[in-house]
Image: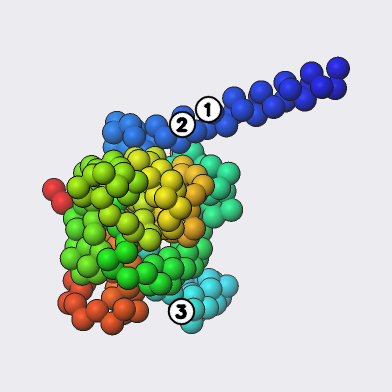
Amino acid sequence: MPKKKKETTEEKNEQIDEKLSKEAESESTDEKKIKEIEEKKKKILEKVAKLKEKVEETKTEELKEKVKAKKKTDMLLPLDEYVKAGIYLGTKVVTPDMRPFVYRRRADGLAIFNTNLIDEKLKEGIEFLSKFNPEDVILVCKRQAGWKAARKFGELTGIRVFLKKYPAGILTNIQLPDFFENELTIITDSWIDKNALNDTLKVHKKVLMICDTNNFSKGADCVIIGNNKSEKSLGLIFYLLAKGYCKAKEINKEIPELEWWVEEID
């Protein structure tokens, strides 16, 4: 009897995991769902901007102290810039891997990342990336929202970038004419960039992964957390990675201001 109960529990857990995985993947691959979620996020950011205009001064001493403390911290960007880019806005699905980074869930179901942790993970990501030379790194970004920023990131850093489609097998099949060996792959979204992720893991190379709340971080050696579905958020992430990497590697390139990276393409 106990054995039968254990099997039933395991089956239930497997069903739950399978359902969660399907929902999580759908949020990254279903264009209709992506548009719906991004439209909702856009409205949230518009409300935030309007509320900010109305607030002229901090009302309580407690909030004032929090603001002062935040200014003293060594953040890559002011907290305000993270908010404006919507990097903290996740999806409705939260995987077990991302749960430790989620601050709360909104009434409409969207999960909210802890902004302090976003900054910390970006710092870790920059430090990790800086250990590798440009010729040993590739960035894969199939999502159109990231093409503009990813392309500029490649121009500035010298890192090879694959947009739209990743040529399957170029890291694993030595018979291919364009085969090459890398040491690190930057994955923008593990759901839609899974071919590049799988190839990298097959050859036992390192992975730097950008994870939204609906991503599993399995296979990643280093994780950057944040919204990986919008132009503004991905623009901010690639801006900070490019800026940090060029500084660490002493690459003398003129990096566009943040406004260029987070500007939405009509």
* First-in-chain label (3 vs 1): 1
In the displayed structure, would residue 208 be above or below residue 94? Answer: below
- Residue 218 placement, left or right of 171: right
The span from disc 2 to disc 1 (Cα, nearest Å) is 6 Å
Kindly check if marks 2 and 3 are in contact, taking CB atoms under 8 A apart as contact: no
Q: Position of residue 23 (x, y in %)?
A: 46, 31
Examine the image and state in which quarter residue 173 appears. Answer: top left
Q: Which residue is mark 2?
A: 23
Farthest-out residue, right:
1
Q: Earlier in the sequence, mark 2 or mark 3?
A: 2
Residue under the point 32% across and 70% down: 133
Q: Which residue is mark 3?
A: 74
Instruction: For the N terminus, give its image quadrant.
Output: top right
**Is residue 211 something one can see in this rendering?**
no
Label 2–label 1 contact, CB within 8 A: yes
Type of amino acid under label 3: Asp
Foreground label between 3 and 1: 1
Crowd band around label 3 with a 10 angstrom C-alpha radius: few (<14), some (14–19), many (20+)? few
Q: Compute the Cα span from label 3 to label 1.
A: 40 Å
The reply to whether residue 33 is in sight is: yes
Q: SS for tag 3?
A: loop
The numbered disc on residue 76 is none
Residue visible at 28% across and 76% down in the picture:
246
| Few, some or many residues within 10 Å of mark 2 (<14, 14–19, 20+) | some
The residue at the far front in this view is 175
Q: Secondary structure at mark 2?
A: helix
Residue placed at 52% from the left, 42% from the top? 94
Q: Position of residue 257 (x, y in %)?
A: 21, 72
Name the mark on residue 19: 1
Distance CA(mark 2)–CA(mark 3):
37 Å
